[in-house]
């Protein structure tokens, strides 16, 4: 019923014990942690696919070069990332939804690149001695660089009991879609319902070669955006046009697009305002609070965009929390293994990186709640 960190739980005797593990990226908890956080990030083989010694050397160089600029960005957020604070809030809300359940549900947090680490979370879960373990990424869209990396780290760290069920993705979960649509409508209405505004669904980008290699991330992002747009047709934003775009490009490789800055400039040339929805992010962090709220806002102003509106990340929106609770309930009702939020596999077969093998059942199981 609670969100816990290492070795702070005692099981309820005689009750079925369920450990829910929330995967997330993590973020530095102080300015001193910025460089080691960046090192952990770039030392991940899922991020830089070089042999160990070469990867470590490159990660050390990159983290050193980027630390100064990154510290300035985190200083704007009070000297630390808010990601853990927001993930803890999500874990508390999620655990509370099972307070009346006939099972002992405990929610744990496993951050990939900072504390609480995956190893620490695995130790805490093992101490809880669960009957079932539900791995639930706070990345709604599967990617080899996020969910798969967290899954691998967990498999290497966890040696405790329990049947393990993994929710690999949930790009069109009913709660996820409803929460995004609700926040878009709220943001637009609070701004006075400005006319001639274009919705930009902005997601973190990936190199094109990752998609060509079978990563379903872009396909799933577009699936979410289309589902949210369909939902918006039922409300006051039905007349607004929309577009998917991608942010946070780094390095020399060609990335999927269009880039969010180019989408903003294109809207300016058309005389349109923009309403940016961070479609891939469920928590506020550096890419929303700095990149969207400062960098892209300044770009929009200089480009002459008449309205620049930014939709909040999902946080603890009730519809999103209800959706996650539904995913947990459905995972408990199926055999152990890896499936999408609606059961089985939703990705087309050409996406070889998808970890789910079976084709999804036709029923939309994610529409239910526990």
Image (spheres, grey):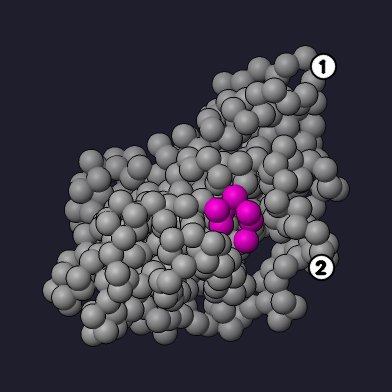
Give how far across and how far down residue 121 sits, in percent.
Answer: 58, 36
Is residue 191 a member of the stretch shown in magenta?
no
Query: Looking at the rendering, in which quadrant would you find the N terminus?
Result: top right
Q: Quadrant of residue 301?
A: bottom left
Q: How many marks?
A: 2
139 left or right of 354 in image: left
Query: Mark 2 Cα within 10 Å, few/some/many (few <14, many 20+)?
Result: some
Residue name at image x 56 percent, y 70 percent: 226
Say if 40 sits above or below 298 in the image: above
Circle number at residue 14: 1
Secondary structure under badge 1?
loop
Q: Are marks 2 and 1 in contact (CB under 8 Å)?
A: no
Q: Quadrant of residue 101?
A: top right
- Point out the stretch of residues depicted in magenta: 172-178
Give how far across and how far down residue 71 sits, in percent.
Answer: 23, 52
Secondary structure under badge 2?
loop
> Which residue, given by chain and number where applicable, does mark 2 sit on?
359
Residue name at image x 76 percent, y 65 percent: 345
> CA gap, disc 2 to disc 1?
36 Å
Residue name at image x 70 percent, y 19 percent: 11
Disc on the earlier residue, 2 or 1: 1
224 left or right of 243 in image: right
């Amino acid at each position: 019923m609670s969100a816990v960190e290492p070795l702070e739980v005692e099981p309820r005797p005689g009750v079925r014990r369920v450990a829910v593990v929330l995967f997330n990226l993590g973020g530095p908890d102080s300015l001193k942690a910025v460089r080691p956080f960046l090192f952990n990030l770039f030392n991940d083989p899922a991020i830089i696919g070089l042999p160990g010694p070469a990867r470590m050397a490159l990660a050390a160089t990159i983290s050193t070069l980027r630390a100064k600029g990154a510290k300035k960005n985190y200083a704007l957020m009070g000297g630390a990332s808010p990601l853990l604070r927001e993930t803890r809030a999500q874990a508390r809300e999620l655990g509370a939804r099972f307070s009346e359940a006939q099972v002992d549900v405990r929610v744990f947090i496993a951050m990939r690149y900072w504390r609480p680490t995956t190893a620490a979370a695995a130790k805490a879960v093992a101490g809880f001695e669960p009957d079932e373990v539900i791995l639930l990424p706070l990345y709604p869209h599967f990617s080899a660089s996020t969910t798969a990396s967290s899954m691998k780290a967990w498999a290497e760290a966890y040696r405790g009991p329990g049947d393990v069920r993994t929710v690999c993705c949930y790009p069109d979960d009913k709660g996820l879609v409803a929460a995004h649509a609700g926040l878009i409508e709220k943001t637009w209405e609070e701004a006075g319902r400005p006319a001639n505004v274009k919705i930009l669904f902005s997601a973190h980008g990936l190199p094109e070669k990752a998609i060509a290699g079978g990563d379903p991330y872009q396909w799933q992002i577009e699936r979410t955006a289309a589902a949210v747009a369909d939902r918006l047709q039922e409300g006051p934003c039905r007349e607004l046009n929309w577009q998917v775009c991608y942010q946070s490009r780094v390095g020399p490789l060609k990335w999927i697009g269009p880039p969010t800055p180019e989408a903003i400039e294109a809207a300016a040339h058309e005389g349109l305002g923009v309403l940016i929805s961070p479609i891939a992010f469920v928590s506020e962090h550096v890419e929303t609070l700095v990149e969207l709220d400062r960098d892209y806002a300044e770009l929009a102003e200089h480009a002459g965009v008449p309205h620049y509106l930014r939709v909040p990340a999902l946080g603890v929106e009730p519809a999103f929390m209800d959706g996650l609770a539904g995913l947990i309930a459905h995972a408990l009702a199926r055999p152990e293994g890896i499936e999408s939020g609606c059961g089985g596999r939703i990705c087309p077969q050409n996406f070889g990186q998808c970890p789910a093998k079976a084709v999804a059942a036709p029923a939309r199981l994610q529409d239910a709640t526990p």
